[in-house]
Amino acid sequence: MALVILSILLIGYVLIATGYATNVNRAAVAMFVGTAGWVLYICYGTDFVMNQHPDGYADFLGGAAASSSNVKQYIAQEVFIKYVGKGAEIVLFLLATMTIVEILNNNGCFDFLSELLKTRNSKKLLWIMSIMTFIISANLDNLTTTTMMLVIMHKLLPNRRQRMIYGCAIVLAANCGGALTVIGDPNGLVLWSTGAVTASNFSASLALPCLIAWGLPTYWLGRSLPDHTDIQCTTMPYRGDDTNLNRWQRLVMLILGIGGLWFIPTFHNITKLSPFLGALCVLSFLWIVNEIFNHKLMNADQMMQRPVPRALQYGIIQLMLFVLGIMLAIGVVRETGILSHVTHLLDFNIHNVWIMGVIAGIVSCALDSFATCMSFISIYPVVDAENLSHFTDSSYMSAFVQNGIYWKAIAYCSAMGGNILPLGSVSGLALMKMERIHVGWYFKNVGFIALAGWLLGLAVMWFFN
């Protein structure tokens, strides 16, 4: 049955990787794999529990007779709920950040971004747009940032060929910026919430590699642009019909929203509570300020619904379901004991974290970067630094302590795989859908230089390690 559960996961991965061709929704696949795996697991629960949790099950029984009902109760209360909690932390964080973005957008706070894009110099416009995306994606999730910037770009540029180039630059910046922080990408968020990395150390280690992986292909894209480009009007639109916020009020809300997200790592370090609670705290405070500023328009027809929040809701809800499904699926595979065999296999045949990082990057080109990252980081537990002396190869095992290089290499490489092919990231898929870009065109014009940027950044990470 363990092999059956593993086979379902692998088939699910194939469907996720080929979703663009088959039009099978990856969120639906992930949810099915996660739910089906746990149903099969609990059907053979006695064998799995006695193999993986004999002592815990004995304590749970407390002298009572073992039975099928008791096994199911133990799995539901002591095993399954642990993975639900981990998945819920990530989902709630994404939900909070999505709502923050919706509040800011509904009040026209992001109109300031359009005001910055006034130049007709194509290369200058490319770098301004890329820098904005890079910075924003380090604070919001990739999909939110990419969708927002693609909508702005689509309204700004009438030329489809140029929109394709600028859209690729946005995806590159979103993926690299998201990989830079623990709150900018679900990969880093999972590593942070499980204690594998700390926020400041993670960002410091990935800063230079991410800048290289972003800057090199962006410069290459700029070479294919003409000296000047035609843009549509970028003045801030009149908001008197749908919001009563003036410029300084919008700026205050923007600072509160983005600044609050910056404060989340500090909140976590002080309280040791889950990061999603900090995100909910920021959301609640911003929500109160929103109602104070808009008290005259609450429940009024004047509160206009813009297209960006609806697009974000649709995409983010799918992303949340996908994340939850993948975490449940990998969790049930871990509980079968198969991952321990995979760990021994990798230690014996590869025994090199950098090679595993390269493999993760290659796999994530086609498979989703989050699914790839979760698969690799679930293979190894976080090693206590004080127990390194107990291992025969302590230098190798030091890669798996908190802030060890393994976690950073896997997070970086899996995120950069989404730059090589657009299939590997939600940002790339959003670009393909909006601008009807084909995989072959993307790799020819962007992917190969993104590959060079990824490997160069990885070499820099290895040199400074």
Image (cartoon, grey):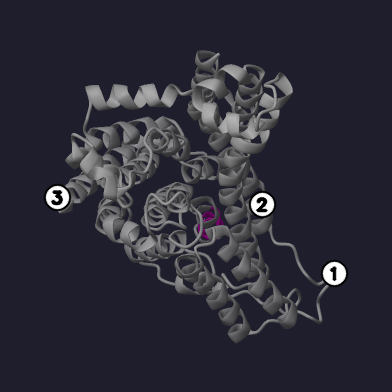
Spatial CA distance of label 1 from label 3 is 58 Å
Q: What's under tag 3, amino acid-wise?
A: Phe
- First reached walking from the N terminus: tag 2 or tag 1: 1
Label 3 CA crowd tier, 10 Å (few <14, some 14–19, many 20+):
few
Dot 2: few (<14), some (14–19), or many (≥20) neighbours within 10 Å? some
CA separation in Å, label 2 and label 3: 41 Å
Q: Are marks 2 and 1 in contact (CB under 8 Å)?
A: no
Q: Residues within 10 Å of mark 1 (few under 14, many from 20)?
A: few
On the question of residue 20 being in view, the answer is: no
Front one among 118 and 273: 273
First reached walking from the N terminus: tag 2 or tag 3: 2
Which disc number belongs to residue 374? none
Look at label 1 and name its amino acid.
Asp
Q: Residue at x 66, y 77 (%)?
A: 238
Query: Which residue is at the front of the view, 26 or 387?
Result: 387
Residue stretch in magenta: 147-154
Looking at marks 1 and 3 on the same chain, the residue that comes earlier in the sequence is marked by 1
SS label for mark 3: helix
Residue occupying the point 50% across, 21% down: 51
Quarter where residue 28 is shown: top right
Find out whether residue 145 is within the magenta segment.
no
The secondary structure type at the circle numbered 2 is helix
Compute the Cα span from label 2 to label 1: 21 Å
Q: Main secondary structure of the magenta part?
A: helix
Provide the residue designation for mark 3.
463
x, y (%) of residue 462? 18, 47
Name the residue tied to disc 2.
Answer: 313
Label count reads 3
| Residue where numbered disc 1 is placed | 301
Dot 2 amino acid type:
Gln
